[in-house]
Amino acid sequence: MISKFLQENDYEEGTAAKHFFFSAIVMLNIGVLMALGTSLRLAWPDILPNDIPWLHFGRIRPVHVHFVIFGWISMAFAGAMCYMTPALCKRSLWSERLGTWNCWAWNLGMVAVFFTLINGLTTGREYQDLIWPLDIYVIVFIFVPLAVNIWMTMLTRKAHGMYVTLWFFGAALLFIILSYFIGAVPDFFPVTGLAEAYMTWWHAHNILGLWITPVSAAIAYYIIPKVSGNTLYSHKIGHLHFWSIVAFYSTPGAHHLMAAPIPEWLKSFASVSGVLIMIPALAFVVNMLMTMKDKWYMFTQSIPLQWALTGVLFAIPLNIQGAFQQTRALNWYIHGSHWIVAHAHLALLGFSSFIEIGAIYYGLPKLLKRELYSQKLARIHFWMMAIGFLGFWSVLTAAGLVQGAAKVYEIPYIQSVAATHPYMVGRVIFGAMIIFAQPIFLYNMYMTAKYGKKLEPRTQGATATVVAA
Ligand code: HEM
């Protein structure tokens, strides 16, 4: 009966995906605005009034992190899943009604996230900061309904076989529910000390390795063949990518705790399995770049391709850096420095966000049945993000090396803080380019919905042919 109610056809096809894509762009704007506060604080600690707790670094930072990860990136994923899964399954979304409600429940959850974190109500655990019962709300009203909708669409598919994008979507939804639940366990059971730290970082690493990395890759697997018109270079390499992520990506959580007194064997295990992450990373990048064979001229012509391929190219330094910075030889030097923050942004802002933005430039106009309002604004958006991000990453990486050197030469910490001041100012400047690029994105998409030229019926909708045989 519930299933019948959910499948009543009173929502137009694509409603859920449209809701998710627009919500994601709003979340991105809020998330980066929060980052302006954090980065200003790190450059000039007294620039914002100190007597307003809402403006303290420790309050704004978790809001920034939550809004970009669970607001922007995860809602963009939900939009992509609701758009691409029906296309690849050759049927409509199992329940547009469930998808649309899921999106409103998600937005409501983000309002609660904002007010709890900004008021200092937090568990203090990275990527699992939400207090009870908000942590359970995230599982029950955000991830489970999304998973049910996507899995049911796959189970009732009319397409023969499952393209690799669906493998990643289906598995990542299971991983995020399991990981989020395990990360929340210290809220109900007396897990404390090192065990709590280990569980927290196991979960935090899985948010990156079993949610953000595979779903971003899955989206690229869809867009790049689709827009370039080439078939995927190799399905076998796609499968190698999938299984090696499953095998190696859930194990290196302890590499976040290389300086903590956890068992030495656990650190070595994390280090070695972390280097093995190079296997899925190489498989993905090679597969995507080879799919572009003879079509590289499209890089400058197609806006979605330009974004998605730039994201794929960022995966190269990301994975080389990621694999080696967690070996003991390098980790002691850069641990706890701005280098790590640069790496985190290379993953989430460089690699992942560029791919999601590509997905939105590709999917949203089609869902709206309109042409993109302004190609020029989309190009400005791209260059502001690309230049802003490269500058941002470079200054933070350099600041991390300065901090590492200060540690080696046992220079008083406060001197290293003073030495990194110019780099913090650099982050504000480059960060501002990224921040001010996002209202342009929102405006362009709003204008597309309102005034974009209507598409001919032939090019409408998400009813894609399966990307490759
Ligand atoms: C889509 C865009 C963005 C994403 C996905 C993102 C993601 C993240 C993540 C995951 C962290 C935690 C990093 C860690 O502790 O290792 C973080 C922290 C931070 N981000 Fe962002 N970020 C984005 C944009 C920005 C922008 C534009 C700025 C600068 C204006 C910025 C400034 C910061 C600052 C200052 C921190 C705190 C760093 C610290 O604790 O030392 N972020 N961000």
Image: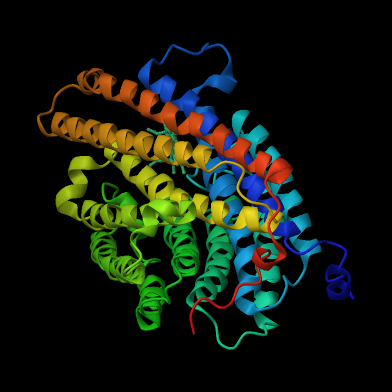
Image height check: is 351 above or below 94? above
Tell me: 265 left or right of 66.
left
Tell me: 372 left or right of 327.
right
Q: In the rendered view, how is the structure colored?
A: rainbow
On the image, which quarter does residue 394 sit in?
top left
For the residue pair 326 and 296, the one nearer the viewer reads as: 296
The answer to whether one can see residue 334 in this image is: yes
- x and y percentages locating residue 92 in the rendered image: 73, 73
- x and y percentages locating residue 204 in the rendered image: 45, 53
- Which residue does the image show at 14% across and 51% down from the upper left? 329
For the residue pair 316 and 226, the one nearer the viewer reads as: 226
- Which residue does the image show at 83% across and 71% down from the upper left? 7
Image height check: is 129 above or below 38? below
Count of number-bearing discs: 0
The answer to whether one can see residue 194 in this image is: no
- Which residue does the image show at 60% across and 39% down from the upper left? 444
On the image, which quarter does residue 63 sit in?
top right
- x and y percentages locating residue 62 in the rendered image: 52, 36
